[in-house]
Amino acid sequence: MKLLRVGTAGQERPALLDAGGVLRDLSGVVPDVDGALLADEGALGRVRDAARSGELPVLDPAGLRIGPPVARIGKVVCIGLNYHDHARETGARPPAEPVVFFKAADTVVGPNDTVLVPRGSVRTDWEVELAVVVGRTARYLESAEDGLAHVAGYAVAHDVSEREFQMDRGGTWDKGKNCETFNPLGPWLVTADEVPDPQALGLRLWVNGELKQDGTTAEQIFPVGEVVRYVSQFMVLYPGDVINTGTPAGVAFGQPEPKPYLRAGDVVELEIDGLGRQRQELKDA
């Protein structure tokens, strides 16, 4: 299934994109798309039955904002330097264990919402990423297979980053990762049954129409199941939590000087096979 949430910010309602590409209203079946729904097999079954019935009300997508596909996200866990080609382009040694950092849940916005360039920023960068949405409480998982079994679905994430804040201002990466609007998510949550192999997905990103990233999740150093298993050794993952699993080569930071960092007026578009497409215009904060 392709689950999403539509409407003005803070007033989104649940929806579904059916097999024919028709947008349908789910608000008569479930109250929202959130961790409670993803953990409830009975409720998900009702959604599947409603989708198959073809009787869900049709929504007109014209002028209808798409919000983040998951409501009330508890935490956004991020994995850094998780692609062989990205590590090479930045001159970093592939990590022996996953690099873990956080984005606050309030950085998450809709897939086509405006992204704000922070005040004082000179090195705002792009990163297309596969986002994993947790569907079952995960703690101390024993295998990568267990990790995959705890995934509810997948989505496109844009891990926007400010490299000066991240690397040159002291402390951890968090200052360069948690600026407002720095995690567009969506358009859809595609349930795990529709993604048979998360290590066989193409990821692409364009800036002002120019292709910048063209990678594949096959390049991940730590695959999805292992990432979920690993993270569960250090924290409890709850239904509705999100894991951004890293970016392939092609970010501005990895390019020759002068590096083409983002500025107000730029347009970024990104997509992952089967998971949909995002588009953001950048403006000054």
Image: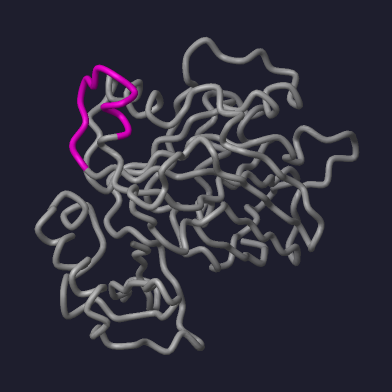
* 76 displayed left or right of 35: right
Q: In which quarter of the image is the N terminus?
A: bottom left
Q: Residue furthest left?
A: 42
* Vertical position of residue 73 compared to residue 17: above or below: above
* 176 displayed left or right of 148: right
| Residues drawn in magenta | 136-148
Nearest the viewer among 89 and 218 is: 218
* 72 displayed left or right of 166: left
* Vertical position of residue 39 compared to residue 246: above or below: below
Where on the picture, by quarter, is residue 266? bottom right
Give the image location of residue 237, x and y in percent: 25, 34
Q: Which residue lies furthest to the top in this view?
A: 96
Residue 118 colored magenta? no
Give the image location of residue 258, x and y in percent: 90, 40
**Residue ID at (46%, 84%):** 61
* Vertical position of residue 185 compared to residue 152: above or below: below
Q: In which quarter of the image is the C terminus?
A: bottom right
**Residue ID at (62%, 65%):** 279
Residue 143 colored magenta? yes
Nearest the viewer among 161 and 148 is: 148
Give the image location of residue 154, x and y in percent: 41, 49
